[in-house]
Image (cartoon, rainbow, N blue to C red):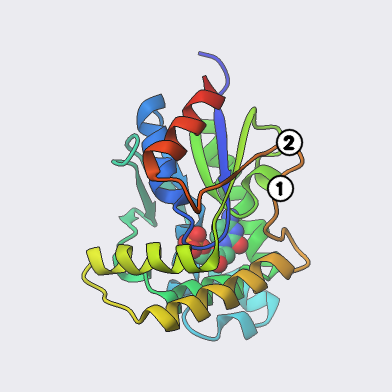
C-alpha cells in the first residue's frame, strides 16, 4: 500500500466545501474530513465562552477529546469520543463559537495533530480553512473555493432550511461576513489560499461544474 493521498479544499463559510469534498471523496473512494466539524464540536463540547478560558483549562479539556473517522464519500462519519458528531453543531451561533476558539493556538495545535494523525491513517479529502497552508502543506492537490458573501448566505440559508433549521437571510449574511473577517484576519493559520492551490470562484458555477473542475485537476 502506498502512502495516503491527501486532497485539500479550503475556503470561507458557506462556499460549499463540504458538498464538494463529499462528492470528490466518493469519486475517489476515500473518506472526507470536515475539519470545521472538529472546531464546531470542540466549541459545542466546551460551551459558550470557552475562548476566554486559561490555556491550562483548555489543555485539560482538550485532553479528553479523541476523534475517529470511518466510511467513504458522503457516508464518512466523524466521531468524537466514539459518538458520531450530529447536526447540533450546525447553527451559525456554534459556527461563530468555533471561529472564536479557532483563534487560539492551543486549540489549533491540538486539532492540527488530530487531523494529521487521521491523514497518516487514511487517504482524505480534507476541507477547512488551513488544510493546504498549515495542516497538509505537502498535499499534491490543493483547492481554494470562493464565492460572494451574498451567494454564500443564500447557499447556507437553503442548507439550513433542508435541515429543518430555518434562518433569517439578512442575519445569515451579516454573521457570515463577521465570521469571514475573523477567519481571514486572525494571526494564526488565517484563511487564505496556499501558494500552490487552484483557486475557483464558484459564484456563477453550479455544483456539477465545480466538481468537474476538481475532478479534472485531480485526474
Ligand atoms: O467550515 P465551518 O463553517 O464548519 O467552520 C467553522 C469555524 O471553524 C470557522 O469559522 C473557522 C473554524 N475553522 C478553522 O479555523 N480551521 C479549519 N480548518 C476549519 C474550521
Mark linked to residue 157 = none
User: Is 138 on the left or on the right of 28, as rendered?
Assistant: right
Q: Nearer the viewer, residue 180 or 123?
A: 180
In this rendering, does residue 123 appear at all?
no
Quadrant hosting residue 186:
bottom right
Q: Is residue 51 above or below residue 20?
A: below
Quadrant hosting residue 178:
bottom right
User: Image point 43% across, 72% down: which residue?
Assistant: 45
Answer yes or no: disc 2 within 8 Å of ligand 1.
Answer: no
Q: In the rendered image, which residue does mark 1 sit on?
A: 134
SS type, badge 1: helix
- Foreground tag (1 vs 2): 2
Q: Is residue 134 above or below residue 38?
A: above
Mark 1 and mark 2: Cα distance apart in space: 13 Å
Q: x, y percentage for residue 191?
A: 67, 58
Kindly check if marks 1 and 2 are in contact, taking CB atoms under 8 A apart as contact.
no
Tell me if mark 1 has few (under 14), some (14-19) or many (20+) residues whose alpha carbon lies within 10 angstroms of its own.
some
Quadrant of the image where one finds ligand 1: bottom right
Q: In the rendered image, which residue does mark 2 sit on?
A: 196
Q: Earlier in the sequence, mark 1 or mark 2?
A: 1
SS type, badge 2: loop
Q: Nearer the viewer, residue 56 or 33?
A: 33
Q: Report the number of discs.
A: 2
Amino acid at each position: 500500500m502506498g502512502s495516503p493521498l491527501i486532497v485539500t479544499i479550503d475556503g470561507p463559510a458557506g462556499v460549499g466545501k463540504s458538498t464538494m469534498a463529499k462528492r470528490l471523496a466518493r469519486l475517489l473512494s476515500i473518506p472526507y474530513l470536515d475539519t470545521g466539524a472538529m472546531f464546531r464540536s470542540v466549541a459545542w463540547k466546551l460551551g459558550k465562552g470557552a475562548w476566554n478560558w486559561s490555556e491550562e483549562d483548555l489543555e485539560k479539556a482538550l485532553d479528553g477529546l479523541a476523534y475517529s473517522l470511518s466510511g467513504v464519500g458522503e457516508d464518512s462519519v466523524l466521531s468524537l469520543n466514539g459518538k458520531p458528531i450530529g447536526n447540533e453543531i450546525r447553527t451559525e451561533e456554534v459556527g461563530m463559537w468555533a471561529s472564536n476558539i479557532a483563534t487560539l493556538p492551543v486549540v489549533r495545535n491540538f486539532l492540527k495533530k488530530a487531523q494529521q494523525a487521521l491523514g497518516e491513517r487514511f487517504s482524505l479529502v480534507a476541507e477547512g480553512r488551513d488544510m493546504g497552508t498549515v495542516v497538509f502543506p505537502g498535499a499534491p492537490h490543493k483547492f481554494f473555493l470562493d464565492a460572494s458573501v451574498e451567494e454564500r448566505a443564500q447557499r447556507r440559508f437553503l442548507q439550513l432550511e433542508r435541515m429543518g433549521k430555518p434562518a433569517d437571510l439578512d442575519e445569515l449574511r451579516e454573521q457570515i461576513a463577521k465570521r469571514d473577517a475573523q477567519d481571514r484576519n486572525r494571526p494564526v493559520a488565517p484563511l487564505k489560499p496556499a501558494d500552490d492551490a487552484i483557486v475557483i470562484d464558484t459564484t456563477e458555477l453550479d455544483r456539477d461544474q465545480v466538481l468537474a473542475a476538481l475532478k479534472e485537476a485531480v485526474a
